[in-house]
């Protein structure tokens, strides 16, 4: 494989910029009289291969470099890094190479730090501690390894040692939020509540205007049962930053613990109206509020006021409009819901949930024209999603527009096949329904091969779906194809739902096609037994007539076919059966 010259130049620049392997290696190898042009060329080629994503070829290149100079820290580092990418089974080998990199370049801070972090990542905490202590001795002015070691001790459950490292850094740098929370976690894990409160006071003494720390202090005080102190801390936070979201939420929780419902509702209203609280947090509080208001006759009014406040506080966020639209939809206020959804879609045209709910609103209103307009706009807004093409095709099919339906469904199919990302926009149930509908359309067009192909695709997408099983089995029988497979599939549906008249009808039809008229008659009568007595299914009646015909009951068959005609829509094939008194395939 030829490596482009541009890749080589890029690799050399990266090596120089980051003071990594290539430059350092040259110095080291010249000192050992091991430097060769061959090594240099192989190393740069291997780096290029790795940059191009060809890790296996890169690894082979670095191995050849290793054969030329096993003492190269850079080569050991690269091999170790690639080995570690290969999974846990290569972890020990990868770590050995990483350690060799450190052994061959003991003053390299980068290698040492990487090795320490890798040791901890792979469960070798003691080895990680050893390396960090080595770093602290070699690089006493570095702050990062002190903090890393403090975190490492925390993860090991060595809380006192963690605090000792944190205190060392504290003496150097003073308080930071990271140091505070690390020490707080240590004291909490040790069950030392007094020390938690003390370091809070120490931190706040140095940072008195940190309003969020006052909130955290109040939360801890509330957890410890120091309710008056907690309220004072929350109020102090509000003095520093009036209306800040953190304090509002903590005060709401505080009054909930105090069972002060009036105050809870006051702060809920402030949270929903706050510009300082994100939508996701407001949504969580809304869910909690719904439970809180359960049984309250004014619950709906309170919810609506809250949603309106959310919208007013963040009018440019489509999620607030979507949330309010969902509430309006549940309240059967479809026109208002549709208005909110149109605003949401204006703000975020690719919002799948917005388009789905807008379509639902149109369907709830029984407005086919609006539904059609929504779907046309949806496919324009999100053209690469098969879902709305599927919905558009489905609507066209039920509006007696088979050509338009086929066009939309085939487009959905092409998107689903060639764009794996679009699969996130359509689930297996919808995909199965889409292919079943394509099968139906092709059956109506007399295309046997495509009918069976798409019915089979439906089953592939949802192999445990009984409807897909039933449909595929039925059309196999219609075309007298693979009747053994048809019987097996249909039997599964009947076994799973023995009272389903559609499944029983299909099984009876397959038995008839196989010439087992006795079994066919038994199952078709079961289908009629569980069907709607007042409005019997025309297809079940037609199949009963077919079975009667093959059992030699021609007059009964014609009579049953007439009943089927009276129960269903126009059917030319059924008319032929009645007029000729014979079964028509």
Image (cartoon, rainbow, N blue to C red):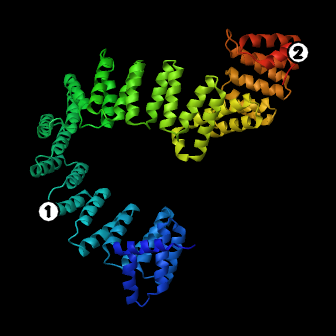
**Rendering coords of residue 578 (x, y %):** 84, 13
Residue 96, can we see it?
no
Q: Tag 1: Cα neighbours inside 10 Å, few (<14), some, or many (≥20)?
A: few
The quarter of the rendered structure image containing the N terminus is bottom right
Q: Residue at point 12% right, 40% down?
A: 240
Sequence-first tag of 2 and 1 = 1
Element marked by disc 1: helix
Q: Which residue is mark 1?
A: 171
Q: Nearer the viewer, residue 421 or 115?
A: 421
Viewer-side residue, 5 vs 235: 5
**Which mark, residue 580?**
2
Quarter of the rendering containing residue 339: top left
Residue 329 shows in the view: yes
Q: Is residue 188 left or right of residue 335?
A: left
- The CA span between labels 2 and 1 is 103 Å
Pinpoint residue 362: horizontal percent, then vertical percent: 49, 22
Residue 88 point in image, percent of width and height:
48, 62
In the image, what residue occupies the spot 33% across and 18% down? 300
Element type at mark 2: helix
Rendered image: mark on residue 101: none
Relative height, residue 77 to residue 527 (above, below): below
Q: Residue at x 69, y 35 (%)?
A: 455
In the picture, measured across the screen, residue 6 lies left or right of residue 475, that is left
- Which residue is pictured at 60% across the width and 36% down the height? 431
């Amino acid at each position: 494989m030829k490596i482009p010259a541009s890749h080589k130049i890029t690799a050399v620049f990266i090596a120089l910029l980051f003071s990594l392997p290539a430059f350092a290696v040259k110095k080291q190898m010249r000192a050992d009289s091991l430097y060769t042009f061959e090594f240099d060329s192989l190393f740069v080629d291997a780096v290029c291969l790795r940059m191009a994503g060809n890790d296996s070829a890169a690894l082979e290149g670095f191995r050849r470099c290793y054969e030329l100079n096993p003492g190269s820290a850079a080569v050991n580092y690269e091999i170790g890094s690639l080995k570690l990418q290969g999974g846990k089974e290569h972890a020990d080998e990868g770590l050995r190479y990483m350690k060799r990199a450190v052994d061959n370049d003991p003053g390299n801070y980068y290698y040492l730090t990487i090795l320490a972090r890798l040791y901890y990542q792979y469960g070798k905490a003691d080895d990680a501690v050893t390396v960090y202590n080595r770093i602290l001795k070699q690089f006493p002015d570095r702050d990062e390894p002190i903090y890393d070691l403090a975190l490492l001790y925390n993860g090991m459950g060595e809380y006192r040692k963690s605090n000792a490292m944190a205190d060392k850094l504290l003496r150097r740098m003073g308080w930071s939020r990271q140091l505070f929370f690390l020490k707080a976690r240590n004291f909490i894990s040790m069950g030392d509540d007094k020390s938690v409160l003390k370091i809070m006071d120490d931190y706040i003494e140095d940072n008195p205007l940190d309003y969020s720390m006052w909130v955290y202090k109040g939360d801890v005080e509330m957890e410890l049962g120091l309710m008056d102190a907690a309220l004072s801390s929350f109020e102090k936070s509000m003095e520093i930053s009036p209306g800040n979201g953190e304090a509002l939420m903590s005060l709401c929780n505080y009054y909930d613990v105090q069972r002060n419902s009036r105050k809870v509702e006051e702060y809920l209203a402030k949270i929903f109206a706050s510009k300082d609280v994100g939508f996701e947090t407001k949504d969580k509080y809304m869910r909690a509020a719904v439970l809180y208001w359960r049984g309250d006759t004014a619950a709906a009014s309170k919810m609506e006021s809250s949603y309106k406040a959310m919208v007013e506080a963040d009018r440019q966020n489509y999620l607030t409009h979507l949330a309010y639209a969902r509430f309006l939809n549940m309240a059967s206020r479809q026109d208002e819901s549709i208005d909110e959804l149109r605003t949401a879609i204006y703000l975020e045209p690719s919002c799948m949930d917005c388009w789905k709910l807008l379509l639902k609103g149109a369907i709830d209103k029984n407005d086919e024209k609006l539904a059609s307009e929504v779907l046309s706009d949806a496919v324009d807004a999100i053209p690469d999603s098969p879902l709305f093409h599927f919905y558009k095709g489905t609507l066209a099919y039920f509006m007696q527009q088979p050509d338009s339906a086929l066009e939309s469904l085939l487009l959905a199919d092409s998107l689903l096949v060639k764009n794996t990302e679009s699969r996130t926009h359509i689930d297996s149930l919808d995909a199965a329904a889409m292919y079943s509908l394509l099968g139906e359309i092709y059956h109506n067009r007399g295309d046997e091969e495509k009918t069976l192909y798409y019915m089979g695709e439906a089953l592939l997408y949802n192999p445990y779906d009984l409807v897909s099983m039933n449909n595929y089995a039925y059309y196999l029988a219609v075309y007298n194809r693979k009747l053994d497979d048809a019987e097996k599939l249909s039997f599964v549906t009947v076994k799973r739902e023995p009272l389903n008249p559609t499944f029983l009808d299909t099984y009876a039809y397959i038995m008839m096609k196989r010439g087992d008229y006795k079994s066919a008659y038994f199952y078709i009568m079961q289908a009629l037994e569980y069907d709607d007595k007042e409005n019997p299914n025309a297809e079940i009646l037609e199949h009963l007539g077919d079975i009667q015909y093959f059992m030699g009951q021609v007059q009964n068959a014609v009579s049953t076919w007439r009943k089927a005609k009276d129960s269903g829509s126009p059917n030319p094939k059924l008319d032929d059966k009645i007029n000729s008194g014979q079964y028509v395939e």
